[in-house]
Image (cartoon, rainbow, N blue to C red):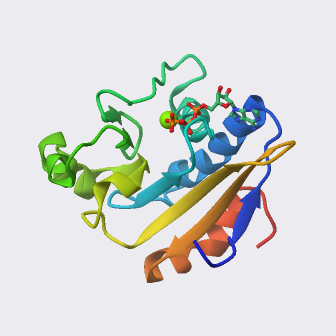
Amino acid sequence: MTNSPFALLTPKTTEETLQAGAALAGAVASGLLQPGDIIQLKGDLGAGKSTFMRGLIRALLGAQTDVPSPTFALVHPYDTTPPLWHMDLYRLEDPEDLWELGIEEAFEEAICFIEWPEKAGTLLPEEALTLEITTQKEHREIGFFAQGAGWLARINAIKSSLGLPA
Ligand SMILES: Nc1ncnc2c1ncn2[C@@H]1O[C@H](COP(=O)(O)OP(=O)(O)OP(=O)(O)O)[C@@H](O)[C@H]1O
Ligand SMILES: [Mg+2]
């Protein structure tokens, strides 16, 4: 992404990355995020995308909830309110294979969090909230980027869910 992020979190430990995910869970619980929303999680292998999702899902479903990386199944639906899907497209060989995963239904009925969205080629809608996680010397950086009117309108509300000044 060329623009600067509208919000930036800098977790120094795994625990702080889990807490960052838990902070965005507030936006799910409050109804700020809605079925049909797509949140792209970008970043190198091991950046912390699944860790962030573990914190988010556990904040909604309980600290003991098992949140595996959906590396092999590619998709993992959760019975949150509203429902959410955690996807990891790293092993998607052909973007067309996406349709076999039931994602059309997910795009209507669930909030979709997608690791490795690059693997879907042009098949994902452009309107998305994108989180870019990078590894710095002493911490990780989680930058938030909004694409599309629906997301731009929610920037301040998302910042406040994250505990950042609007
Ligand atoms: N802020 C942090 N500081 C140090 N280590 C961290 C931090 N956040 C997460 N980690 C660790 O980094 C690793 C991240 O793994 P994780 O599976 O979350 O990455 P990922 O981005 O989902 O990778 P993949 O692309 O393979 O799915 C884990 O071992 C986690 O404990
Ligand atoms: Mg992962």
Q: Note whether 24 is above or below 85 in the view shown.
A: below
Image quadrant assignment for residue 107: bottom left
Q: Farthest residue to the bottom: give it.
A: 149
Residue 27 location in percent, x, y?
Answer: 57, 55
The quarter of the image that holds ligand 1 is top right
Q: What residue do we see at 28% from left, 67% from top? A: 122
Residue 13 location in percent, x, y?
Answer: 80, 33
Q: Farthest residue to the right: give it.
A: 138
Query: Could you tell whether 77 is left or right of 16 in the image?
Result: left
Q: What residue do we see at 56% from left, 29% from top? A: 58
Query: Could you tell whether 34 is left or right of 20 in the image?
Result: left
In front: 12, or 160?
A: 12
Residue 54 location in percent, x, y?
Answer: 56, 31
Residue 90 location in percent, x, y?
Answer: 37, 41
Query: Could you tell whether 69 is left or right of 105 in the image?
Result: right
Quarter of the image that includes the C terminus: bottom right
Q: What residue do we see at 62% from left, 73% from top? A: 155
In front: 93, or 63?
A: 93
In front: 69, or 86?
A: 69
Quarter of the image that includes the N terminus: bottom right
Q: Note whether 132 is above or below 13 in the view shown.
A: below
